[in-house]
């Protein structure tokens, strides 16, 4: 990314799981898309690249948009993009449908036919007698799902039904077709059924922590010695292929489907108690919860039906969500948290509403933004925080402007401007002035727009809001020809460009 050095650091941070692109990030969505395409083309210039995205039907709109953006930039480079999706799992209106319609090629991939299933089994077991006895049963039960076929062979080997013999695997007895799994969830149930009570409890509690989990925290929750738990998890990985190492004292479930099957298989009442036990363990550490730990506590308390207890560290948990999770995941969870936190004090509920607004802003869901802001206005009025009320009015003004309702946008901006002055909040004062300026511009009054933007520019410069300064400079450049300052357009745009 030599041509855009300012993008390198935030792009690297994003790839490491840091800030998501958006208004509060140093990396805009457009910059992210452009950087990803440039990096892939640079890699492809060194040697051909094949990029495969599995389970594209689970992707959010921005991921699909990024995929399409890279595809448009791929011609001429030895770069092949492959996206795999299950057409029977696509939700109505999924952006993947539009992507598939515009793709160079869409290749239907079904389950393996009988002959291919037999060849797959032959490749693994190597004994023809075993192939003839096992392949038809596996094909009938799995309907040719290769994941189920391979995992079942491994399971039969682990159970001793398949044994090593002459550089291959031989059946020690006839396979019970009725006992063979038909789906990944059946396979998970079969694997769990082979475990003792202690092993099963370990995996159930691990699933409460997540698809990837910390062994130290799991040991605390279970009241186990860490060394003994690590030995147990290692055995569950080697003997049962259920978990695998993911770093120092970290493990992950071998497959997402296995994690989901185990978590969903825990009875709801027991699941809530497990979440409650994890929350109590985290609270008992004596550390003030911040960042990731605060979010983990919020999640476990929510699922335990104790969301109100997260009130003291709610803001830290919300900040972590905004930094770490995509808006399409965060918004539905925050909606549920908002409902669960209904008894909380207005400032806490207002904090949730503001984070929800940010999510819907990133998702460009204007109706949801206004719905959230309606609630936020009511909550802000219940507080003594004048700056919070100014912010809500400023955001409502911007949202009305996006709707094209310039009259109400101006009304909200003037209300926000008065409150921001009262609070001495230069940020929202500048935002309101900027919005009033764009309303004047839309009404064909360039001189009035320029005056408001210059006032906003002064405020934004005074508080070091460089992104705001660049945005306002661009707006000013638009009206300069109409107010007799056309000669300053290029210099003004160059000043904005240098900041961006």
Image (cartoon, grey):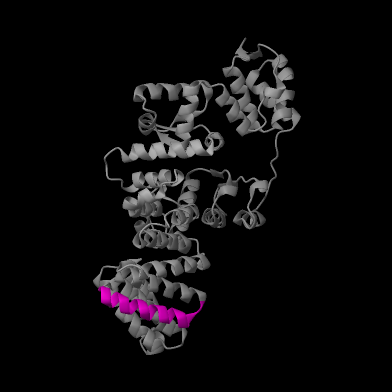
Q: Position of residue 208 (x, y in %)?
A: 46, 37
Q: Quadrant of the C terminus?
A: bottom left
The residue located at (49%, 32%) in the rendering is 204
Looking at the picture, how far across and down is residue 41, in whole percent? 49, 51
Give 15 or 260, whichever is nearer the viewer.
260
Position of residue 116 measured from the top left corner of the image (x, y, whole percent): 72, 29
Vertical arrangement, residue 136 with respect to residue 493, above or below:
above
Residue furthest out toward the front: 343
Instruction: Specify the segment rendered in magenta.
Output: 404-424
Does residue 37 sit above or below 387 in this rendering?
above
In the visual, does 298 lie left or right of 200?
A: left
**Camera-side residue: 453 or 143?**
143
The magenta stretch spans residue 311? no
Between residues 285 and 240, which one lies in front from this camera angle? 285
Residue at horizontal 31 percent and vertical 76 percent from the top: 419
Residue 259, position as x, y percentages in the image: 52, 35
Chief secondary structure of the magenta span? helix
Residue beneath the point at 46% across and 83% down = 407
Does residue 1 appear in the picture of this structure? no
Q: How many marks?
A: 0
């Amino acid at each position: 990314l030599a041509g855009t050095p300012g993008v390198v650091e935030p792009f690297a941070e994003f790839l490491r799981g840091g800030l998501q692109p958006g208004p509060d990030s140093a990396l805009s969505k457009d910059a992210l898309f452009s950087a990803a395409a440039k990096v892939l083309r640079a890699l492809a210039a060194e040697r051909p690249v094949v990029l495969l995205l599995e389970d594209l039907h689970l992707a959010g709109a921005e991921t699909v948009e990024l995929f399409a953006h890279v595809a448009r930039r791929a011609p001429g480079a030895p770069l092949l993009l492959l996206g795999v999706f299950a057409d029977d799992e696509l939700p109505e209106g999924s952006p993947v449908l539009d992507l598939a319609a515009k793709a160079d090629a869409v290749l239907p991939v079904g389950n393996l036919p009988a002959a291919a299933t037999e060849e797959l089994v032959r490749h693994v077991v190597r004994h023809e007698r075993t192939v003839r006895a096992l392949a038809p049963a596996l094909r009938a039960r799995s309907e040719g799902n290769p994941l189920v076929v391979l995992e079942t062979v491994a399971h039969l080997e682990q159970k001793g039904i398949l044994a090593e013999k002459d550089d291959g695997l031989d059946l020690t007895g006839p396979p019970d077709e009725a006992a063979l799994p038909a789906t990944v969830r059946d396979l998970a149930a079969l694997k769990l059924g082979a475990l003792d009570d202690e092993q099963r409890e370990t995996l159930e509690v691990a699933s409460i922590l997540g698809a990837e989990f910390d062994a130290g925290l799991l040991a605390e929750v279970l009241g186990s010695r860490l060394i003994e738990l690590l030995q147990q998890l290692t055995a569950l990985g080697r003997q049962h292929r259920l978990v695998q190492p993911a770093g120092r004292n970290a493990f992950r479930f071998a497959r997402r489907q296995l994690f989901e099957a185990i978590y969903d298989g825990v009875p709801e009442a027991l699941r809530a108690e497990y979440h409650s036990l994890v929350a109590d363990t985290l609270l008992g550490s004596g550390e003030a919860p911040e960042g990731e730990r605060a979010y983990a506590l919020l999640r476990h308390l929510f699922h335990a039906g104790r969301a109100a207890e997260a009130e003291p560290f709610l803001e830290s948990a919300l900040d972590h969500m905004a930094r770490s999770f995509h808006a399409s995941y965060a918004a539905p969870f925050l909606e549920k948290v908002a409902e669960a936190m209904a008894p909380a004090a207005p400032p806490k509920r207002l904090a949730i509403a503001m984070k929800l607004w940010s999510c819907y802003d990133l998702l460009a869901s204007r109706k949801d933004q206004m719905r959230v802001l309606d609630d936020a206005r009511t909550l802000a009025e219940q507080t003594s925080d004048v700056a919070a009320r100014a912010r809500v009015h400023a955001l409502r003004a911007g949202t009305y402007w996006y709707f094209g309702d310039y009259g109400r946008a101006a009304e909200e901006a003037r209300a926000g401007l008065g409150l921001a002055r009262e609070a001495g909040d230069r940020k929202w004062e500048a935002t309101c002035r900027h919005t009033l300026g764009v309303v004047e511009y839309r009404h064909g009054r360039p001189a009035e727009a320029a005056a408001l933007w210059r006032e906003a520019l002064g405020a934004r410069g005074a508080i070091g809001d460089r992104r705001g300064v660049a945005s306002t400079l661009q707006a000013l450049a638009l009206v300069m020809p109409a107010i007799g300052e056309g000669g300053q357009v290029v210099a003004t745009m160059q000043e904005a460009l240098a900041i961006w």
